[in-house]
Image (cartoon, coloured by chain):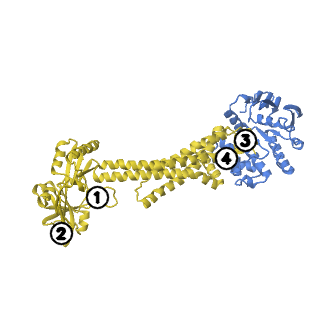
Chain colours: A yellow, B blue
Amino acid sequence: MIAGARLVREVKLGVKTLLLHKLRSFLTMLGVVFGVASVVAMLAVGEGASQEALEQIRKLGSNNVLISSMKPPDDQIGGTGRVRMIVYGLAYDDERRIRDTMPAVARVVPAKIVRKEGRLGERVLDLRVVGTTPEWFELVPRPVLAGRVLTGLDRERGASAAVLTEYGARRLLATANTIGQVLRLGTQYFEVVGIVQSEGGQGSSVQTPDQEVDAYIPINVARDRFGDIATKISAGSREREMVELHQLIVEAKTLADVEPLAAGLERMLERFHPKKDTRISVPLALLRQAEATKRTFNIVLGSIAGISLLVGGIGIMNIMLASVTERTREIGVRRAIGAKRRQIVAQFLIETLVLSSAGGLLGVAVGLAIPRAITYAAGMPTVVTAWSVALAFGISAGVGIVFGLYPAVRASRLDPIEALRHA
Amino acid sequence: MVPDATADGAVIELDDVRKIYRMGTEDVPALAGVSVRFRRGSFWAIMGPSGSGKSTMLNLLGCLDRPTSGTYRLHGEDVGRLSDDALSELRLRRLGFIFQSFNLIPQLTVRENIELPLYYLGWEAPAAAERARELADRVGLGNRLAHRPTELSGGQQQRVAIARALANDPDILMADEPTGNLDSATGDQIMELLRELNGQGKTIVMVTHEPDIAAHASHRLHMRDGRVEQVEGEGS
């Protein structure tokens, strides 16, 4: 109890002494302020980047590997004349091959994109419809806003069921009351069975599977009703594209399987798609990317923080050495009265700690403001965590101890007689 | 409780004490063999020209320094053998210091200055505040407790310093030219206060070069070239 009361007194005395030279104390603190602010900001940016990556991975599924069909470069395309037929992309065989030959695969979900004019009630629009299997909704889970998602029964029966996305529903002015109504796609008729929430969308750096999809229908229905050939009419020429599948989502059994699986798929696609008409993306790789961003930020801000704290610490040490010289006589008096060396050390160390901790508090305040500014100005997500604030503040206290120790020990080593004689 | 090792009541005993400072390659003796005994309750003035060794003597007696050779016993305890911490402890419990330039700590109030020894003794704050008030009353500054030293006159500052020196209730007061920075009227008042304290049983050792001031003491020790030249006073 006495020790606690003493500590309080020493801290009060330290504050009082530092307030005698307000400007000097404030300027001395600045290095620590910037250093601590940098630490808080650095950790906030890093945390923001990795949380964003984790969020995207959650949307895409961390165990998933995405393979998309890609129109190959022009020189790879055969055929000339007014009517061209381009055949590229993933095939039904690819899906089967992956399912049958890769043991690390848990599920394979195909996606087939159909562009048709659609009509719901009075609205007529060009729609992007994805034919897929019910597993799609398990692989990338998302809330159902109304009705239901596709089921195995829809596939077995070849049901004309369509699930609108939130995005599609908004475009078609559909609401929960729309469930059960008829959606016309091209020349075919579908029943709207549900609406699901869209994931991702604007501002996101990766293409999520849902983006700009208006509706989902069973893949076998899509194939039966619309076939594999799409016709584009442009500048008087007809271009026909034949694409069996636009996307395959391959789910690995465990997280550890993801990268070997991606490498295996890459090799397989190289063999069967020499035209390079496919592209692999691994959501898990986003995490690596986020970590790289984080690392860059950590190096830049970490250097600023390190230099600021070092310079700040040296500044503090310098001021404390000056203070010891200035207060030599006080030290002499305290020693004559009976203060032991360690009590003198404690006094000056606490004073330094008060100084650096005050700098730390200010630094935390500035450090809380910087991430907001970064988010506002650069649109980067930032997350300030409690432990980062605690760490930064701890560093400021550490700076106080490290750079305060030498002046304090020096004060305690003064010969009391010499100190009393000091002018 | 105070152990008195000697039969004749000596609190301070110096036996052939020498203090030698090294200046470059030369050894300079500041004290060249001093043997004296101060009794409990006596009031000593140490006099002598500058360089006579009187300051060195006071530093030694005040346990701020240790003799190079010879023995110094304070209450029978051999000071020369004590560690730095033990010397601090001895100063804290047995001695009080009064300086020529008062040496109050400027950022502390009068009360906090007086409390300083109590703080190092580990007193609880309320008890220390109470004691500081009593002592301030005793030196006639009960209404100045919240003031800063710079707001006080020289005489008042020296009174605060005396109150501080008394806070730990020491047996011995060490005074280094206590009136040196004061005008003679104020100086006389301070000497009056010291005599009063001596009358209450405190042993006082004072360094001065002014014969008028030394006249207040019961004993005078004249020093020259690090030796005792002459001792004046009753019963020594």
At label 4, the amino acid type is Ala
Residue ID for mark 2: A119
| Mark 2 neighbour class, 10 Å CA radius: few under 14, some 14 to 19, many 20 or more | some
* Parent chain of label 4: A
Residue B197 lies left or right of residue A280; in this view the side is right
Residue ID for mark 1: A199
Q: Residue at x 40, y 53 (%)?
A: A48
Q: Between tags 3 and 4, which lies in front?
A: 4
Dot 3 and dot 4 within a common chain: yes
Residue A243's x, y, as percent? 18, 56
Q: Residue at x 15, y 51 (%)?
A: A92
Marks 4 and 2, the one that precedes in the sequence: 2
Q: In terms of secondary structure, where does tag 2 sit?
A: strand
Marks 2 and 1, the one that precedes in the sequence: 2
Marks 1 and 3, the one that precedes in the sequence: 1
Residue ID for mark 4: A322
Quadrant into which the C terminus of chain B falls: top right
Whole-angstrom CA distance, mark 4 to mark 2, is 83 Å
Residue A101 lies left or right of residue B8; in this view the side is left
Residue A416's x, y, as percent? 72, 39
- Do the residues bearing badges 4 and 1 touch, measured as CB atoms within 8 Å? no
Mark drawn on residue A419 = 3
Quadrant into which the N terminus of chain B falls: top right
Q: Between tags 3 and 2, which lies in front?
A: 2
At label 2, the amino acid type is Arg
Dot 4 and dot 2 within a common chain: yes
Mark drawn on residue B14 = none
